[in-house]
Image (cartoon, helix red, strand yellow):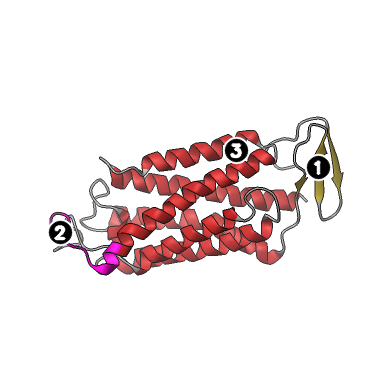
Amino acid sequence: MTNPTFFETVKPEGRLVMETSTTRSTTTATGHAPQRSVHPAASTRVLLTAGVVAGPLFVVVALVQVATRQGFDLSRHPISLLALGDAGWVQITNFILAGLLMLAFAVGIARSLRDGPGHRWAPVLFGIYGVGLVIGGVFTADPALGFPAGAPAGVPTSLTFHAIVHAVAPPIVFLALIAATFVVARRLGWQGRRAAAVWSRAIGVGCLLLSVPGPGMSVRLLLAVAVAFAWISAFGISLLRRGAAG
């Protein structure tokens, strides 16, 4: 028997549980929504797994570059600047690959959430986040703050088109991911998993506060991205485990 994950709670007493080899339905005398867990198809499990691995891969690759790229200082430079210079292709690939994995995850979410709160909006919001990551890789920032070598010491007075797109699109789509934490929280509450719902909302609020412009924003933004991706991984694992539990 596996232990409950961050998103899983023990069923309260008083529920009548009916199980078959492929589905599990739960009803309660108190009127809680039925809970059904269906074995995901192999392709759906692959799609969900894509979302589970997207975050750890993205964060690890970014941190390795932070530690090894000459002249890069996370206290001054946002990770977007890692997409510049001779080794910029690594972060460009990192953005695009994470985005494609998130798009796959969105499809897996759409297949997994057949009804109930969030079954329409959750995959849309995860998909928007995936598109934003791809945009972040395709449209790079302009050199600034002395990085890479030879870049202006400050912020450019004018931005190129691709830098404008990079500056606008990813922050907007990160708000979509924050919205997803609340959409998922509503679903968790509907399922009777109140503690997980509270945590999901708390993570959304925390990521929003961490991404507010101000001192130390580069560090805080990377932390917000890491926390958000950890939440995505936990949600994906929860869907896989609950499905596997039948």
Image-based side of 14 in relation to 64, left or right: right
Q: Position of residue 18 (x, y in %)?
A: 86, 44
Q: Position of residue 158 (x, y in %)?
A: 17, 62
Query: Disc 1 designates what residue?
Result: 26
| Magenta stretch secondary structure, dominant | loop
Label total for image: 3
The residue mark sitting in front, 2 or 3, is 2
Mark 3 is surrounded, within 10 Å at the Cα level, by few (under 14), some (14 to 19) or many (20 or more) other residues, namely many
Identify the residue at image location x=32%, y=64%.
165
| Label whose residue precedes the other's in the sequence (2 or 3) | 2
Magenta span includes 116: no
State the mark number for residue 197.
Answer: 3
Q: Secondary structure at mark 1?
A: strand
Identify the residue at image location x=59%, y=46%.
184
| Label whose residue precedes the other's in the sequence (3 or 1) | 1
Query: Disc 2 designates what residue?
Result: 157
Image-based side of 159 in relation to 212, left or right: left
The residue mark sitting in front, 2 or 1, is 2
